[in-house]
Structures are given as C-alpha cells and as structure tokens.
Image (tube, rainbow, N blue to C red):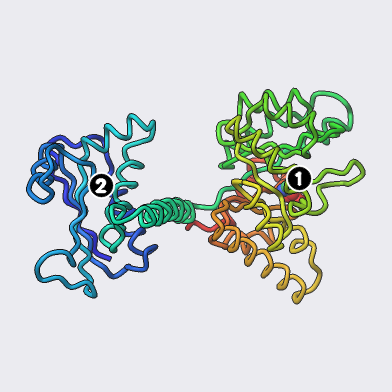
Amino acid sequence: MPVFLNNRHPSMPPLSLALIQKRAELLLGLCGRAEAELSILLLDDLGMAALNEQYRHKTGPTNVLAFAMGEGQGADLSGNLLGDVVISLDTAAREAASEGIGLHRRVTILLVHGLLHLMGLDHERSATEARRMADREKQLLERLLAEERREKMINLAINVDHVATIRQARGGSEPDPVLAAGICELAGAGGIVVHLREDRRHIQDRDLFLLKQTVKTKLNLEMGAAEEIIAIALELKPDMVTLVPEKRKELTTEGGLNVAGQKKRLTEVIARMSKACIPVSLFVDPDSRQIRAASDVGATFVEIHTGRYSDAVGEKIREAEFNLIAEAAEEAFELGLRVNAGHGLNYQNTARVAALATIEELSIGHAIMARAIFVGLDQAVREMLALLPAR
Ligand code: PXP
C-alpha cells in the first residue's frame, strides 16, 4: 500500500506526518484500493497558488487539488497509480481554526476529498454527484475513525458499586467507592462505572459528585431512564451514561434494554443528553433488532450484555452465546456504533470477549471486587488487565 508523502511546506505547522501517512493507507484499504499508489504533496499557500494558476487558471491558493493518473497523458485508470493529492497546509490551518477542529482532522478531511476525486467522483458535475460525494466523504471519515479505535488496546472500565454495597451494609463511610476508583485507575483501569439506582442501594449522590471531581480517566454513569436520575446526569455531566433497565427487586441488572419497544422515549432522552454533550450507551442483549434500534435512536455506544454467555452451562450453549455476542458486536460496529460489553465477565471468560476486534471497552465489577477481597484491589485489577490482548 504505497503512500508517498512529500512535505514541501517551508515551515510546516505542527502536524504528524506519520499519522497522515497511516490515515492515507487506511483510507486506501477502506476504499478497496489497498494496492494502489498514492502520492500526497503538502505545500504552503504560495506553492498551491502557483499550481492553481497553472492547472486551473485560478488566482490564489485553494485547500486541495487532485491530479488523477487517469486525467493526463499516459492515462491508465485500471492501473495501480491513483495520482496525487496536493494540500495547502496554510489554507487547511485557517479552515481548521474557523471550524474549531484540529489541523490533523482538517487535513484528513481534505485528503478524503482529494482521494474521492482521484476515484472519479466530482462534486462539480451535478448536484446529485455533489450529494453522493459528501455522503461518501462522511462515511469514509466515520469508518476511518472506527478503524483507528479498533487498533487501540481494549479498555477496562471498572464498576465500583460493590464497594458502596459493603459500605451501605453498615450505613457508615467505609469502604469508600471514591477511594476504590482511584486505586483502580492507579492500577491501570481506563474508566470507572457506577450505577446510581433510584433506591440508592449502593452508590449515593455524594459518591457521584466526588467521582466527577476525582476520576482521571472516564466516568460512566449507569442509570435507568427515570426523570429524577436524568436530571442528576444532566447536572453532573459524566463522560458518558449507560442506560439500563432498572427493576427494584433485581439483584443486578437482569436483561438488556428493550430499545425497539421504546424508541420514542429513548430518542428523546438521548437528544437531551446530546444537548448536554453526554454520549449515551444503551445496554442491550446481543440481538440484531435491539442493535438496529440503538442505531435508529441515536445512541453513540451499545454495551452488549454478556450475562448469558457468562452464565452459560455447557460448551454448546456457551459457544452459541459467544457467537451471538460476536455477531452483535460486528453488526453494531458496521452500523457506526461504538461497542462496549459487560456483565458477568470474570477471570476465566473475559479473554475471549476481549479478543473481539470490534469491542473497545469491557465493563467489569463483581469478579474484580470478589478477587480484591483476597488479593487486594490493585492486584485484582492488574490480573484482569493482564488478560486483555494488546492489539
Ligand atoms: N454492565 C452493566 C450495564 C451492568 O449493569 C453491570 C452490573 O452492574 C456490569 C456491566 C458489570 O457486571 P459485573 O458486576 O457482573 O461484572
């Protein structure tokens, strides 16, 4: 997948050429042109203005120009030489500033635009083609981001509810879930999860507001979609919320949310969270209907319920449940959802789920806290982390 990246900007603004090169390679793969040769030239406005004058008879610089191999003499559209994308970093930097985005993102957008030109799309041909090109650009950018996320190591988010359960058994102040969260983070956890239940059986409002101040990684508030809890979430502004079904009598969250059966309500709740910049995850069973509904209602994430897999007795049933998780995760990923998973995962059954490339985060509580009683919380977290594959 040869990408020839040539920087001819005399004083390049801060830009990682390695990242742009990597993104160009990923984009070629996503376009089904993994074998193609692409050349990228980075210029300043002066250089770009000269090219714009020479080839388009236009005065002044532009942001991106694409020169397809198929356009000029010696054209060979079927060959592997795609052509050149030329980007003015000065124009890209101005556009990035006015759009409030980073330079890497702006250059990536221009790269996608240029690449689509090289593949024969042209927004200047007609309004229909302009729409098609804009749709394809958006889709490619989303898939590129998803591809990059997939390459990262899976994240371990730890649920510290059980620490609060022990505290509540005596109604005192120890053990403190806020302190537990800090120990989990020091041991390498990538996120902290707490479930604020309507009956406040474990996590209290005080815990939440302290965690918001102390968690350094990511605070995920698990919650039912009750108005009282929604109001707290909107005030707290955690890094994300995970909506779960909540029944007072259950020992722990039992099944996934019936998203398909309450699309209107969930669309409304997600819109309110989005307005407060809080991404929403929906805890769903590994069921295609629920995954599609989660995409329809505008969720950012789904958390796939791994409880039936974790509780499965016998190889055959466990295998079937695992396959459902793998298929659901893939379907969600392809729909553009970010994919987490959790419930019932332990030191025996986690590695297999963690190996699914479409899953970015696991949410684990009980198994880690149970082990922590014997080996200490720091050690229990580290042992779980050791089971997760580096990708
Ligand atoms: N994800 C969700 C949505 C949950 O409700 C729970 C349980 O609180 C978990 C993950 C963690 O499950 P476990 O405690 O079995 O690891």
Q: Position of residue 317 (x, y in %)?
A: 77, 73
- In the rendered view, does 255 fall on the left or right side of 280? right
Residue 371 can be seen in this image: no
Residue occupying image coordinates x 84% and y 24%: 172
Q: Quarter of the image containing the N terminus?
A: bottom left
- Residue 44 position by quadrant: top left
Look at mark 1 in the image and give the residue it sits on: 244
- In the rendered view, does 206 fall on the left or right side of 126? right
User: Neighbour class for label 2 at 10 Å: few (<14), some, many (≥20)?
Assistant: some
Residue 205 can be seen in this image: yes
Q: Position of residue 115 (x, y in %)?
A: 29, 57
Q: Position of residue 123 (x, y in %)?
A: 31, 53
Q: Vertical placement of 5 versus 216: above or below? A: below
Furthest-front residue in view? 126
Front residue of this view, candidates 326 and 62: 62
Q: Amino acid at mark 1?
A: Val
- In the rendered view, does 211 fall on the left or right side of 150? right
Residue occupying image coordinates x 28% and y 49%: 18
| Pair 2/1: label in front | 1
Look at mark 2 in the image and give the residue it sits on: 17
Marks 2 and 1, the one that precedes in the sequence: 2
Mark 1 residue CB less than 8 A from any atom of ligand 1? yes
Front residue of this view, candidates 22 and 375: 22
Residue occupying image coordinates x 16% and y 64%: 71
Q: Position of residue 66 (x, y in %)?
A: 21, 54
User: Neighbour class for label 1 at 10 Å: few (<14), some, many (≥20)?
Assistant: many
Front residue of this view, candidates 344 and 129: 129
Q: Vertical placement of 327 versus 187: above or below? A: below
Front residue of this view, candidates 189 and 253: 253
Q: Amino acid at mark 2?
A: Leu
